[in-house]
Every structure is written in C-alpha cells, then in structure tokens.
Amino acid sequence: MIYIRKLWNLLMYAGIEKAEYDKLRPVIRKKNQELLKVFSLLGAAIFLVLFVVSAASAGFASVNSSAYLLCASGMLVILIGSLLLLPNRLPLTVLFVFLFEILLYFFGIRISLLHADKVAVSAVAFLLVSPLLFYDRPIRLSVLTISVVSVFCVIVSRFKSPDVAETDIWNMITFGGVAILTTVFMMSIKVHALHKSEQVEQLSQTDLLTGVKNRNHYESRLMQYPGLSSSNLICVYADANGLHEMNNREGHSAGDRMLCEVAAALQKHFGTEHTYRVGGDEFVAFRTDGHLDSLSSEIAQIKQELKQKGYHVSIGVATRRKADSPMHMHEIVNEAESNMFNDKREFYSRSEHNRRSRAPSPAQ
C-alpha cells in the first residue's frame, strides 16, 4: 500500500506531499510564466529566421516555409499572452504551457508529413525535450506524451509508406516510453529542488517564533507597497504591552505565548504576507486598498480579542490615499508608530495599568 501511495505522489505531485505541492503551485505558475517568456521569444526568433532562410532557398528547406511561419506566429501569440495576460491570470499559465508544447509537437508532425519519404526526426526530438522545459505534474505530461504518440502513429500510418511508417511508429513508441520515464524522474528532481529552495527562502523571511514575516523581509518589501496600492494604503503599528513584566513575572515562555497571540491576531485581520515582526514586541502590518471607514472598529476588535486572552496591545494607524499625495513609506510607518506611542501612553495612564510600567516616550 505504501508503494502505491509513493507512486501516486510521484505521478501527481512529483514525489512530494499534496499539501506541499498545493503550496508550491503559485511558485510553479510564476516559474512557468518566466520560462514561457524566454522560450516563446527564442522560439519565435528561431522560427522566423528559419522561415526567412527557407523562403530564400530552394529544395528541402523551402518546403518547410509554411510550417516555420505558422509556428513563429504561434510563438508570438504565446509571448504576447505571457507578457500581457498571465501576470494577472496566473492559473492560465497551464493552458499557455500546453499550447507551447502542442505547437512544438504540431511542428514535428507537420515536418514529418512534408517529407513523407523520410523517417521523422523533429517529432522524436520534441517528444524527448518538450516535457522537460517547464514544471508540471508528471501524470499530465505523461498523458500528453501518450496522446501525441497515438496521434502521430495514426497520422503516419495513413499518410506515409508502410516501411517508413513502421519505423516512425516504433521510434515514437520507444522514445515515447523513454520520454515518460525521463519526465517523471526529472520532474521529481526539479520540483524537489524548487520545494527546498522555497523552504530556505521562507525560513529566511519568517520570524521563527511567531510565524509572521521578519524584519529582513519587511525591509526588502517596504518600498513595494505604493506600487501594490491602487486606491489607498493602511499601515498598522502594534506593540505588546507588558512583555517585559510578563517575562520577569512568569518566564520567557509566557512572553513568547503573548507575542504569538498578538501575531496571530494581526495575521487574522491583515494576512501572513503583510504582517511583520520588526522588533522584540513590535509588529507592523499593511493592507492595500482596504475600507478606511471600518478600520477603527477592526482595531478595537483586535484589542478585544487579545484582552479576552489576558493580553493588551497598543496600536497606531496611518493611512494614505494614493490620489492625495505621494506615498513615502518611512513617513507613513513613523506616523503609525507615533500614534501607537500615543495609544500606549493612554493605556498606561489608566490607574489599573500604572503598576506595570510608566508610559514610554517615542525616544524609548
């Protein structure tokens, strides 16, 4: 049973677990989008050059002109789609990858029919190479390979002489099997390498205690937020009240639990990708194009959720509308931090909290 499960994971998820593959799918789509840009550009350039050369020559190459022109046009369509359409519709990447691969297979079959008296070479070459160009499920690539081999065998058996067709059919079946085995093996290696790379990158970006993004990732992404906003930007600066006292009174494990609860509350409302731990007890969260009129009630809700667990947090907010003024990120964050200090003063000014600490100043 365990071998069946391993085989299933190998064919469906390239040897990793389903949950891990699902997390990796956006990365795979992004990688394939970038690869499509490169390969479709190269393909368009190569087929255009071949078309010009074949159109200017006579004999063998000139017969291929129409196939070269058709493939060059198809590559240009895929290139334009990968540049204009895919950035906002990443799920369509799978469709464009299949169009690219099918176009190569079509070219191989078409060239084979144009030279019906000769054994197919291009079709076999593309059968071996094409599945290795992108990232995909091995089962899907295997099904595509089997389909191409089947279509090719039917076509050549009808349009080629029996002796040439027989050679082509045996070649395609043999190399089709090799292509499937190679694809499953190589795709497993590629996906495992991508998975490990993503794990390392996630660890370098993540605060290991709380699970939110760390200071390094905050610094690298801060200046990207104006470009991510189309109407407004919300910055929230939060500070866990009484962390030092809790560490002294109940131990650092209690303080760690407090930080994790504060991080979880912010993540719940602002998302993991936009919540950062920027200091020992300080967090920054962003929201692009959010509803400003409901922000105050949402902040109150965060405080109430934490209060019910026995924790208190001071929160400052700064907002900017994109149409009003340029978004200077350090200015926005500093404003939110200043408002957080005002909230902290108010918290410690209440008699029930005076015993814990004195009110801090921005200089602290």
Image (spheres, rainbow, N blue to C red):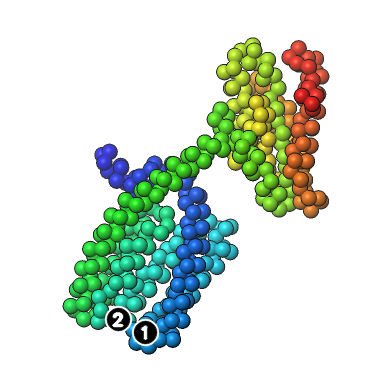
Residue 164 vertical position relative to residue 249 in the rendered view, above or below: below
For the point 19% across and 79% down, which residue is it? 162
Q: Position of residue 234 (x, y in %)?
A: 72, 42
- Which of pointers 2 and 1 lies earlier in the amino acid sequence? 1
Residue 204 vertical position relative to residue 31 in the rendered view, above or below: above
Q: Quadrant of the N terminus?
A: top left
Q: Could you say which disc has been placed on residue 63 in the image?
A: 1
Residue 275 vertical position relative to residue 148 in the rendered view, above or below: above
Identify residue type, mark 1: Val
Mark 2 element type: loop
For the point 60% across and 35% down, which residue is it? 214
- Rendering quarter of residue 173: bottom left
Residue that numbered label 2 is attached to: 115
- C-alpha distance separating marks 2 and 1: 9 Å
For the point 63% across and 16% down, which residue is it? 247
Q: Could you say which disc has been placed on residue 81 in the image?
A: none
Q: Residues within 10 Å of mark 2 (few under 14, many from 20)?
A: some
Q: Position of residue 28 (x, y in %)?
A: 47, 51
Mark 1 element type: helix
- Rendering quarter of residue 101: bottom left
In contact (CB < 8 Å): disc 2 and disc 1? yes
In this view, the residue in front, 289 or 291, is 289
Confirm whether residue 292 shows in the render: no
Q: Quadrant of the C terminus?
A: top right
For the point 26% across and 59% down, which residue is it? 178
